[in-house]
Amino acid sequence: MYEGNQRRHACMPAFLFCVQQIEPHVRKTKGDYSREDDRHVPMAEVPELGGKAVDVLICESTYGIHVHENRRAREARLLRTVHDIVRREGRVLMPVFALGRAQELLLILEEYWERHRFLRENVPIYFISPMSKKSLRVFETFIGLCGDKVREIADTGENPFKFKHIKTKGTLDQTTRDILKQKDQPCVVMAAPGMLQTGASRAVFEMWADDRRSCVVLTGYSVKGTLAEDLRRERDSVTIQGRNLPVRMSVENISFSAHADFDQTRAFVHDLQARYVVLVHGERSEMRKLKTKLEELIPDCQVHTPENMEPVFLAVESREAQSVQIVGGLAERVNGFLRPGGVEGPEDDRIEGRVKRETFGGQREGG
């Protein structure tokens, strides 16, 4: 164990987790952090810290200062768009990421199809991804951690992820490919990957791109240089592997991204009373815009936007003596660095104390 009056923290990437110590507090979010209440997962919660402020918040910045459309309006627009397209015998492609947003959209479509006889009897839905069945199994296994709507269905004895109106496919096999080529057969295809860079989603797009009755609905985030981003910019044609492909199908951008928007991030930082915020998981320009806005609205907060692999040194004063325990190989490495007067490093970040490495066969101490 290491006993001292200051400590340094390292957080490994994960979807969303909180490192809680008595002093100081560190909260880190990475990737899919959202304060929206979904069907498949509940919103990210603000932790109870007993009235104490968070010292360091490491937070995503994917959408910068952009604000999402109202959730109910967005869902209604999606369903209206899909219904209108299939009514005119068109086909709908929804590129998705296989785990997370895909399950939310599947639940939305399943619920809507259940209410509309015409759709149930005439319009099939396909979910095509190598992870399609495995991803559903993950949610079935941890159904108790899902959102309220899913748990309410599960409490009745039904499996909310056993879909009646959706066919799951691991790959775009020849039989399915032949079905999707039939221009007079309306259908909905959800396929990975979400940015159309390869795989089933791009193959389906290439099949349908010249059909004016059909539509591609972009439901998630896309980065520059991807086919999804090109379509988002409403281009009349795209270049795929050196060949020009005219785009006659309509393009709708209805985002159900799992990433927080500006309003969610601002409220999150404010509620945690964070002293320092380190922005990650975002494009440089969006990170800088978000930094400027957060520091303007929350003057007591210092925001950092490090480059990839750039270390960030923060001086966090401990208000009372505390201890942190280190076990295993890390304890041995820390023991090698300790010396009288503290470990080498910035003058305001010295570590003093002792390390004890405990094993099953006994214990060893070092000073």
Image (spheres, rainbow, N blue to C red):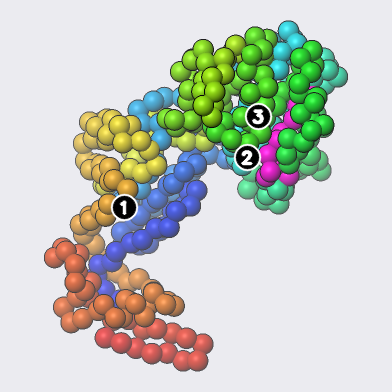
Q: Where is residue 304 shown, x and y percent of the image?
A: 25, 44
User: Residues under labels 2 and 1: Cα distance?
Assistant: 28 Å
Camera-nearest residue between 222 and 361: 222
Residue 41 at least partly seen: yes
Tell me which label, 2 or 1, sits earlier in the chain: 2
Question: Which residue is depicted at the point 23% across and 56% down?
Answer: 313
Q: Looking at the rendering, in which quadrant would you find the C terminus?
A: bottom left
Residue indicated by mark 3 = 203
Task: Indicate which disc, 3 or 2, sits on the residue closer to the N terminus.
Answer: 2
Residue furthest to the left in view is 347
Single out the mark in the foreground, 3 or 2.
3
Query: Mark 2 belongs to which amino acid?
Result: Ala
Q: Nearer the viewer, residue 202 or 91?
A: 202
Residue at left 29%, top 64%? 8
- Residue type at mark 3? Ala
Counting from the top left corner in percent of width and height, residue 202 is at 61, 29
Instruction: Answer above or below: position of 129 versus 115.
Output: below
Q: Secondary structure at mark 1?
A: loop
Residue interval drawn in magenta:
124-133
- Give the residue at x 32% y 76%: 334
**Circle 1 crowding by C-alpha within 10 Å: few under 14, some 14–19, many from 20:** few
Q: Name the residue beneath numbered marker 2.
A: 98
Q: CA distance from mark 3 to mark 2?
A: 16 Å
* Amino acid identity at mark 1: Met
- Which labelled disc corresponds to residue 309? 1
Viewer-proximal residue among 180 and 32: 180
Where's residue 299, x and y in %? 21, 36
Q: Is residue 175 above or below residue 315?
A: above
Helix, strand or loop at label 3? It is helix
Which residue sits furthest front? 242
Horizontal arrangement in the rendering, residue 174 relative to residue 26 (left or right): right
Residue for point 38% across, 51% down:
27
